[in-house]
Image: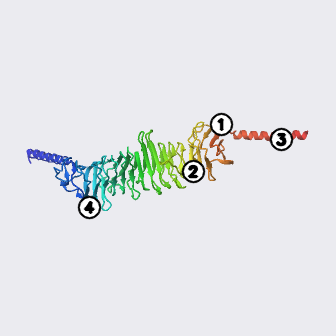
Amino acid sequence: MSLRHTSCARQVSVLAATCALFAVSGHAATLYWDGETNLDWNTASNWSTASNATTPNPTTAPTAADDVVFNITGLNVGPQVTTAQNIAANSLTFNGNGGLAYRISSNSGTSRQFLLGAGGVTVNSGSGQVNLGNTSATVRFGITASQTWTNHSTSNIVLQNSGGAANTGTDAVTLTVSNTSSGQTTFNNALQNGTEGRVLTLVVNSSGSGATNLSNTANHTFSGGTVVERGLLISNSQVIGLGGVNLSATASHTATLRIHSVNAVANNFTSSGAATGTNVLEFTQTSGTLDGNITLNRNLNVGVRLTGATGVVFNGNITGTADLIKGLYQNGNSGLLTIAGHATHSGDTVINNGAFTLADSGSFTFYIGANGVNNRITGTTASLATFDGTFNFDFTNASLVDGNSWSIVSLSNRSFGSGFEVAGFNKAGDGLWTHANGFSFSESTGLLTYSVIPEPSAVAALAGLGVLGFAALRRRRVRG
């Protein structure tokens, strides 16, 4: 082949590739629904390329590159969009149009896949409820790229069927939920990873009062973790995904996780975020159990509902540097919180409302420093604290000056049960625990104190002098 023919072939090849590229990118469009109810997504005539007219129609129904809007201006019909095939879009936008409700569902009686791109879901103010999927025939929503679902309305977004990361591909994706008004976003079925390995992370960042809800019947198996940065996440399930849960409030905002389950929750929890943020963990049932560990990088506020004698039990370990604060439950009540694991965090434990118990299996570690410097158990005078577990004292940095003292339990309404003990100390009676190195802890005062003890040789010398003195006195008496 001649050089000229080779050059021409290359030009044709480049031109073909360029044309193909423009064909793909040129296909991306914003398409507006102009059909009525119970019509097929896959029929091109049910769509328009104009926002205010039923024509012109696109050449094809929406595909993965297209942004989809419901409805064209002036179409006051809440469409029940159906599909008998797998469908896709880059984004879904639902406009107000007088509070119309929307549904995207399968009409084939079999499960279908809806692949959703980076544009996510937007429900604008004035919209009615948006139902993604239905109960009779499933449409699984597969997320192909990290995206945000934003609800600006007072109505709800409801994912009726299972969803999560797309079953194709292996790139990790993040689903961020942002409720900016009172409308909620609810996942009625399982949130999952993709079958080929794509991992899903759930993030809640809501400026409005609308909650994000995880259903109580769903087996949420996504493993990328759950992060609450702002707003309210309500979990009615004992499985909040298979990853950790991070309450990570952004600056000046509150991040709240409300657990509405009597079953044991196995997730590990972390409290982190901005110094000016507030992290809240609430339990709404009369009883509950948290088996996972808690890491306190920022203060964590815990609320327990005031009904039932059992309350909530923390079986896991508590580590970190910040405070654990037991406060009011969201309706103004506060029930019993029991620590049954090992609390080794160096921050304080603050009991501001309700009852608190250290179970027989539980323990607290206190880090003793300079005079009066230590972590402690403190709170309001009305709070009741009962201790049946173990106190551990870390004297690594303790200031050994005669008369130094440290407030360990400053709650005036406190009691120590028969199972209570101080590790390494001996009980001397009347609630006093003593240690051979000069420390003593008093149950009645809640204070740890230090006093200088003479060296063993000095004690022996004094004892010898005492014996000798007694002997000399006896000789004097005999002689006399």
Taking 304 as reference, is 453 left or right? right
**Percent from the top left, x then y, of residue 305?**
50, 51
Callout 4: SS: loop
Crowding at dot 2, Cα within 10 Å, few <14 / some 14-19 / many 20+, comes out as: many
| Alpha-carbon span between mark 1 and mark 4 | 81 Å
Q: Quadrant of residue 476?
A: top right
Crowding at dot 1, Cα within 10 Å, few <14 / some 14-19 / many 20+, comes out as: few
Which residue sits at x=30%, y=60%?
138
Q: For mark 4, what is the residue? A: 107
| Alpha-carbon span between mark 4 and mark 3 | 108 Å
Disc 1 versus disc 4: nearer the observer = 4
Q: For mark 3, what is the residue? A: 471
**Of callouts 3 and 1, which one flags the residue occurring earlier in the amino acid sequence?**
1
Callout 1: SS: loop
| Alpha-carbon span between mark 2 and mark 1 | 29 Å
Q: Amino acid at mark 1?
A: Gly
